[in-house]
Image: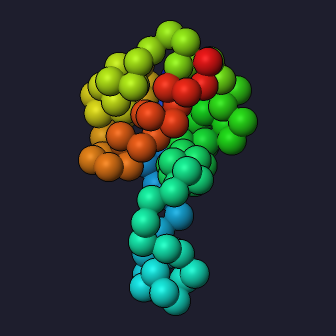
Amino acid sequence: MRMKWVALVLGTSLVLAACGGNDDASDKPASESGETTTAGAGDAAKIYENKCSSCHAVNLEGGVGPNLTKVGAKLTKADIEKVIANGQGAMPKGILQGKEASMVAEWLSKHK
């Protein structure tokens, strides 16, 4: 019974960690934090790194979550957006929403 509790606590911790992100930059205006307000090619990778890499690893090779190195060969951008929006398996829904979800889905769809 004790092992089940430990597994439950660790699993819950991982899910909650995946939901978090580095919100420090949002505390400052873009002009103070050195960020620009236009979306660039690196933005999707940065969003992924902040919100997704805790489960899928920075290099996309997976960990707690599945390997995404060739996800674009299996899923379309729309399919990836559906997984982000609805969750899948242990992945909770809505970690990314709106423009962020669309940007990351497009970026991941190019990984073939």
Identify which residue is drawn at 34% across, 30% down. Answer: 81
The answer to whether residue 42 is left or right of residue 109 is right
Q: Which of 107 and 19 is in front in this view?
A: 107
Is 12 situated above or below 31?
above
Q: Where is residue 38 in the image (x, y as percent from the top left)?
A: 43, 66
- Left or right of 112, for residue 25: left
Using the image, determine if residue 50 lies above or below residue 111: below
- Counting the numbered discs, the total is 0
Residue 48 screen position, x and y as percent: 54, 45
> Residue at 42% across / 85% down in the picture?
29
- Residue at 66% x, 31% y: name it: 60
Q: In which quarter of the image is residue 76?
A: top left
Does the image show residue 100? yes
Whether residue 99 sits left or right of residue 72 in the image: it is left
Q: Is residue 100 above or below residue 93?
A: below
Quarter of the image with the C terminus in it: top right
Relative to the observer, which residue lies in front, 9 or 71?
A: 71
Q: In this view, does 19 lie to the left or right of 87?
A: right
Colour scheme shown: rainbow
User: Where does the image place residue 73, in percent across and percent down from the top left?
Assistant: 55, 12
Residue positioned most to the top: 74
Residue 2 visible (yes or no) = no
> Residue 50's x, y, as percent?
55, 53
Q: 76 or 56, which lies in front?
A: 76
